[in-house]
Image (spheres, rainbow, N blue to C red):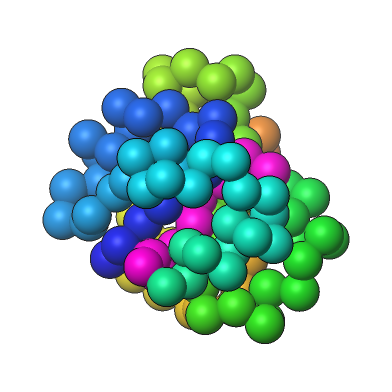
Amino acid sequence: MRILFDQGMPKKLRRSLSGHEVKTAYEAGLSEFSNGELLRAAEKEFDVLISTDANIKYQQQLTDYNIALIVLRAFTNSLADYLPLVPDLLETLENIIPGKVFYIYADDRLARKDESKGLKK
């Protein structure tokens, strides 16, 4: 899968995505583009845009683009806070659909973890 990391994504997170081709917006020459321009340019070369910007969905009509969007939100911008999201990210990449938005939030993972703890009691 060809993945584009939007601005703000920890570059070293790509190490956890072996088997996928990952470039940053800067490396792809797309760092100066706004959301609509970015999506138009990215869909030509990438299958997925991974971003921290949850507002893209409201600013752009994603069904108009032949690229999927995954919004990753961790507690901070540190790699350590993104690493726990990798299993959900890898699973999402297996089921990706162009024109769709997928959300993976750290606080959602904690909520699921807490719920499962409650069920085990």
Q: Give the range drawn in magenta.
A: 45-53
Q: Tell which residue pokes out farthest to the right in this image.
A: 58
Is residue 68 depicted above or below 99 in this figure? Answer: above
Residue at point 66% right, 34% down?
107
Residue 52 position by quadrant: top right
Q: Percent x, y for residue 67?
A: 51, 72
Q: Percent x, y for residue 12?
A: 31, 27
Residue at point 58% right, 63% down?
39
Residue at point 55% right, 21% down?
77
Is residue 50 on the magenta stretch?
A: yes
Viewer-proximal residue among 23 and 103: 23
Viewer-proximal residue among 58 and 96: 58
Viewer-proximal residue among 116 and 77: 77
Q: Is residue 113 visible?
A: no
Residue 16 position by quadrant: top left
Residue at point 69% right, 62% down?
36
Viewer-proximal residue among 47 and 45: 45
Q: Percent x, y for residue 6?
A: 52, 43
